[in-house]
């Protein structure tokens, strides 16, 4: 299988698969032309890694789990020990989630908005945030694998939203989906934007075009408002912020 095929089989984005390869969690064969050739076993390993990461296992935990997965002489006690340690961490994460939720409720009269910025990969951290937050904005590239990852993330969010509703009586809203680094002249981006709008309607905000100022600001680790305050990129960002503030009034 090539990387696109194993991505579909495992449910992981190609970028994540390349990362797992870089750190040695999966080692696909290479064809004569240098392209990756993933086996069925590689697909099973990647799916296993995806499930483990979604349950909150760290990369090093996953490395240990993979070595146990591949070791036919492994002792069941080793697996149980790692699982038991992880359950203790899960219990602590749940306590942390409620602590965040309770603290934000205490501060509700003194602050307007708290923003959590997280990676798109589902984890126990997301569970804590989903419990504590009221609404979510999803940035996404208009690329096929990114959109597949977005759909999985939103499915994950719905599972937590149902639990949040039961525990707190409050709903978790999707404020919007923001296409970023958009290249409107490419067929892939324009068609994927159309598909996004067909699926999510008005929830899809105005795309943020790919601009050099974003790359420069990222390289300098400074906000675009600081690096290029009068640029088109800064104007795009202010438009997005205005939309977010407007949407927040309805939460």
Image (cartoon, helix red, strand yellow):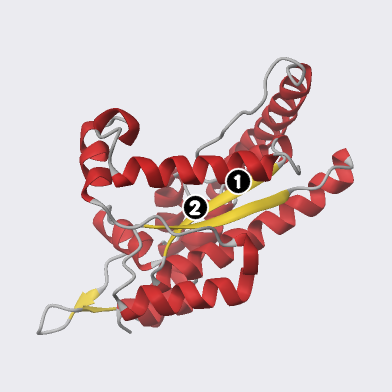
Q: Is residue 106 left or right of residue 149?
A: right
Q: Which residue bears the numbered disc 2?
A: 121
Q: How far is disc 1 from disc 2 in space, using C-alphas? A: 21 Å
Q: Going 73% across and 57% down the picture, which residue do you hit? A: 159
Residue 169: image location, x then y, percent: 89, 42
Quarter of the image with the C terminus in it: top right
Quarter of the figure with residue 196 = bottom right
Residue 227: image location, x then y, percent: 25, 31
In the depicted structure, whether residue 141 falls above or below residue 137: below
Residue 52 seen in this snapshot: yes
Residue 3: image location, x then y, percent: 32, 76
Disc on the earlier residue, 1 or 2? 1
Quarter of the figure with residue 12 = bottom left
Between 110 and 68, the residue placed more toward the observer is: 110
Q: Going 24% across and 44% down the picture, which residue do you hit? A: 213
Quarter of the image with the N terminus in it: bottom left
Q: Is residue 140 left or right of residue 123?
A: left
> Could you tell me which secondary element the residue under label 1 belongs to?
helix
Q: Is residue 184 left or right of residue 157?
A: left
């Amino acid at each position: 299988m090539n990387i696109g095929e194993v991505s579909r089989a495992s449910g992981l984005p190609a970028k994540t698969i390349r990362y797992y390869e870089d750190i040695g969690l999966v080692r696909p064969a290479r064809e004569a032309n240098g392209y990756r050739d993933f086996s069925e076993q590689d697909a099973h390993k990647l799916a296993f890694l995806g499930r483990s990461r979604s349950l909150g296992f760290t990369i090093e935990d996953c490395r240990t789990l993979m070595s146990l997965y591949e070791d036919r002489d492994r002792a069941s006690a080793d697996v149980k020990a790692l699982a038991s340690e992880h359950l203790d961490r899960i219990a602590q994460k749940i306590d942390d989630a409620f602590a965040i939720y309770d603290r934000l409720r205490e501060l509700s009269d003194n602050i307007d908005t708290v923003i959590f910025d997280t990676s798109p990969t589902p984890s126990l951290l997301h569970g804590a945030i989903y419990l504590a937050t009221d609404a979510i904005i999803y940035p996404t590239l208009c690329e096929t694998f990114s959109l597949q990852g977005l759909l999985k993330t939103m499915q994950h969010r719905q599972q937590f939203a149902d639990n949040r509703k039961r525990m707190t009586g409050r709903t978790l809203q999707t404020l919007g989906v923001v296409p970023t680094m958009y290249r409107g002249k490419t067929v892939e981006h324009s068609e994927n934007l159309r598909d996004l709008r067909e699926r999510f309607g008005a929830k899809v905000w105005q795309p943020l075009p790919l601009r050099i100022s974003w790359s420069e600001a990222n390289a300098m680790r400074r906000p675009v408002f600081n690096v290029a305050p009068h640029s088109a990129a800064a104007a795009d960002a202010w438009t997005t912020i205005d939309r977010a503030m407007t949407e927040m009034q309805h939460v």
